[in-house]
Image (cartoon, grey):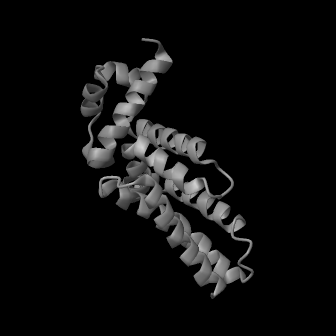
Amino acid sequence: MPRAQRREQIIDAATRAFARAGFRSTGLDVIAAEAGVTPVILYRHFASKADLYRTVLDSAGARLREAVGADEFDDTSIPALLRAASADPAAFRLLFRYAPREPEFLDVVNASRSTAIEIAHRNLAEITDAQWRSWAAALLPTLTTDAVIAWLDAGRPDADQAAARIRHIVDAVINAALNQ
């Protein structure tokens, strides 16, 4: 198997394994077995478990940004987020449920959160009160990703209805910030 393809195979296996048991409880032997490689092959691609975990988080984040878009929020954003989460629930849960619980990777989590808040802030220009805009911008990324995780955990009921319902929540926060 070509090196790049093998690396992706390991990243995919590590994503699933880390999403099941977390960083501390997942051994490289478990990841190697999940990927169908030996630990030696795994070490040829990644210097350490921490290096692999960071790569997994970066890869999952990049795929999510590609699927959803990185700058604008519009009517396609929430359905795209649901599709991305449905396509790779392990990566989505890892990014938004498990990685924030890993203190040694908070820099990755905090950078991602800061970017999401910045994007939300730019897209909430209709909220003219700076403090309420900041409040809504900080609340919406967490609220939206938690709503998607709850949707995944509920068995992924109708994605179109889920998108509409999540959008109602987003609109409620915006209206609250506008004081309407």
| 109 shown above or below 125 | above
Q: Is residue 51 visible?
A: yes
At x 45% / y 26%, what residue is drawn?
A: 8
Residue 176 position within the rendered picture, expressed as x and y whole percent measured from the top left: 58, 83
Looking at the image, which residue sits at the far top?
Answer: 1
Q: Considering depth in this image, is 39 or 58 the residue closer to the camera?
A: 58
Residue extending furthest bottom?
A: 179
Q: Quadrant of residue 26?
A: top left
Hey, which quadrant is residue 134 in on the image? bottom right
Q: Please tell me which residue is depicted at 62% across the width and 58% down the height of the picture.
A: 75
On screen, residue 128 above or below 91? below
In the displayed structure, would residue 99 be above or below residue 150? above
Drawn side of residue 173 relative to residue 95, left or right: right
Measured from the top left, where is residue 42 in percent x and y? 36, 24
Q: Nearer the viewer, residue 146 or 82?
A: 82
Residue drawn at (36%, 19%), measured in percent from left and top? 41
Report x, y in % for residue 39.
Answer: 30, 23
Please state the horizontal and vertical placement of residue 103, each as a whole percent of the image: 40, 57
- Would residue 13 appear left or right of 138 to someone viewing this image? left
Image quadrant in which the N terminus is located: top left
| Count of labels in the image | 0
Residue at 74%, 71% (x, y): give it: 125
Is residue 24 among the parts visible in the rendering? Answer: no
Frontmost residue, 67 versus 105 = 67
For the C terminus, which image quadrant?
Answer: bottom right
